Image (spheres, grey):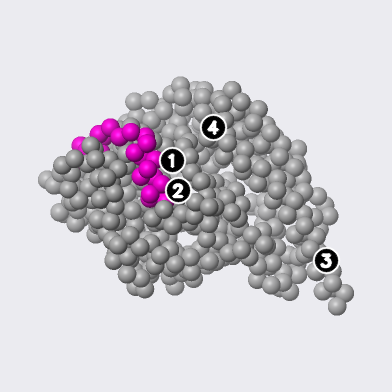
Amino acid sequence: MEQKTTLVQKLEYVKGILAIAEKYDHAVNVLSYDQETICPPDAMEEQGEVWAFLNNQSYKLIKDQAFIEAAEYLYEHRGELGEFDRVMAEQLHRNYVQTRNITPELQHEFMLTFNRAFVNWSKAREAGEYSLFAPSLKEVADTNRRMIELRGEDAAGKTAYDTLLDDYERGMTSEVLDEAFGACKERLIPLLEKIRRSPRKIRTDFLTRPVEEEQQVKMAKWLLKQMRFNFDRGAFTTSEHPFTANMGRFDTRVTTHYYPDRFLSSMYSIIHEGGHALFDQNQLQANFDHFIIGGKTLGMHESVSRFYENRIGRSEAFAQFVYPKVCECFPEAMEGVSQEDFYLALNAVQPSLIRTEADEFTYTFHIIIRYEIEKALFAGEIKVEDIPALWNRKYQEYLGVCPASDRDGVLQDVHWTSGFGYFPTYAIGNFYNAMYFNRMKQEVAVEESIREGNFEPVNSWMIGHVFAKADRLSPKDWIRDITGREFTPKDFLDYLEEKYSGIYGL
């Protein structure tokens, strides 16, 4: 009885501290969102310092010895806890192991490093000059290495890069990715060559016709509404790099970017970010009550966003549904364009420089390139200064294109400003959603529902199977729970081969 009383007291204490930390985290998220949307350029560094300060206040709360002792007590007695409290205790323990040698002072130093990197990346991207960012990128890489070294035994037996991969996708290793990406190269490189040689040419001229921003805003709002994005608990605006920010239980925000000569860009970035938002807006209240909302991995999240963007958004059924609205919103751009023209254009394979604008087929190569560069950097095979040249060579090797500037090359992504190991999760997400799509279509009339513009059957299946346990299961257990199978890239590669062989008459 005494032990049970102690357990309840520890549980109440830990949750009380986490509730306070959550308020700081909320403020940090708002500042981060502001910095990437409307913050004036000259104010970004100062605002970043405020962001780092508030982040550090939250960090101090969970580094307090009384909190650590209480949280570790819960972990030691996790077998006596209910499921959600047990998961909370396990997440807190994992975080403790990762950060136990990182003092609040060090953590603040690291956050300032990442913020400086973001500011310098923004300046470098604007100028199109990698040399303005390289020193900060080296600082980020050194910080990642230092954080790993501070783990001591906890990182023993792993390469530095595998430790980073595991931080973003628990249980993932470079050995698994080497095999998966090896399979991608083995099957997709020959197929890309066949597509290039195909006599079937897809019309894409209308995709670069000028479209006013107001027209694109109207289309973006309509798309979010069709997806069942909840505007009472969400908002959207613009940013240089589209993203989704989950502020809290009732506040999920998405952004997009409008280009006057690329209307598909905003359409598909909003579908992608809308997928992230649906994941966030449809979480169980219990996840928030037990502070486990951060349990889902980036691979899980990217699987959902890319599911809506590609498996749904580039399907023939979706093209049929959305075509009349596209013609209504963009009448000049769509003049003389048939529904078949539109569908084929959505799926045209065109090797290009920009990852976020890449077609569904070649996208995987953009991830492989970044993965191979990150892995080489942390293996000591290259230096930060070598990245642009290696980047350009790999783009030429895999896709037959080469950036004319750093802006369209190594500076296009913001992700490296906050560390390494993130990019593979995009491809991992594709592998996941190909697996669960094959399960879904056995139980849901996906094509018929989407052709009618009815997202409810698809969303309901996603909520019940994909979203429900994401915060409570490891990625390996999660994908097995959904599909009854082990992780594999095969479903994704089979899908690409079947779809694009049909489109290009191979």
**Where residue 188 appears, x then y in whole percent?**
29, 51
Q: Residue at x 30, y 34 (%)?
A: 211
**Residue at far bottom of view:** 1
Find the distance from the CA under tag 3 to the CA under tag 1. 45 Å
**In this picture, is 49 found above or below 54?**
above
Earlier sequence position, callout 4 versus callout 3? 3
- Mark number, residue 9: 3
State the CA–CA distance, disc 4 to disc 2. 19 Å
Write the start and end of the magenta stretch as one range.
203-224
- Residue 246: percent from left, percent from top: 56, 49
Q: For mark 4, what is the residue?
A: 38
Q: Do the residues labelled 2 and 1 touch (CB within 8 Å)?
A: yes
Circle 1 residue: 256
Q: Which mark is residue 273?
A: 2
Q: Earlier in the sequence, mark 3 or mark 1?
A: 3
User: Any magenta on residue 99?
Assistant: no
Q: Distance between the residues labelled 2 and 1?
A: 8 Å
Q: Do the residues labelled 4 and 2 touch (CB within 8 Å)?
A: no
x 84%, y 72%: residue = 5
Nearest-to-viewer mark from 4 and 2: 4
Vertical relation: 474 (above or below) 112 = below
Residue at figure coordinates x 34%, y 73% from the top left = 442
Across and down, in percent, residue 323 comes to 25, 50
Who comes first in sequence, dot 3 or dot 2? 3
Distance CA(mark 4)–CA(mark 3)? 44 Å
Q: Which of marks 4 and 3 is in front?
A: 4
Q: Check disc 1: other Cα within 10 Å, few if <14, some if 14-19, many if 20+.
A: many
Total numbered circles: 4
Describe the element under mark 1 as helix, strand or loop. Answer: strand
Q: Is the magenta stretch mostly helix, strand or loop?
A: helix
Q: Find out whether residue 217 is within the magenta segment.
A: yes
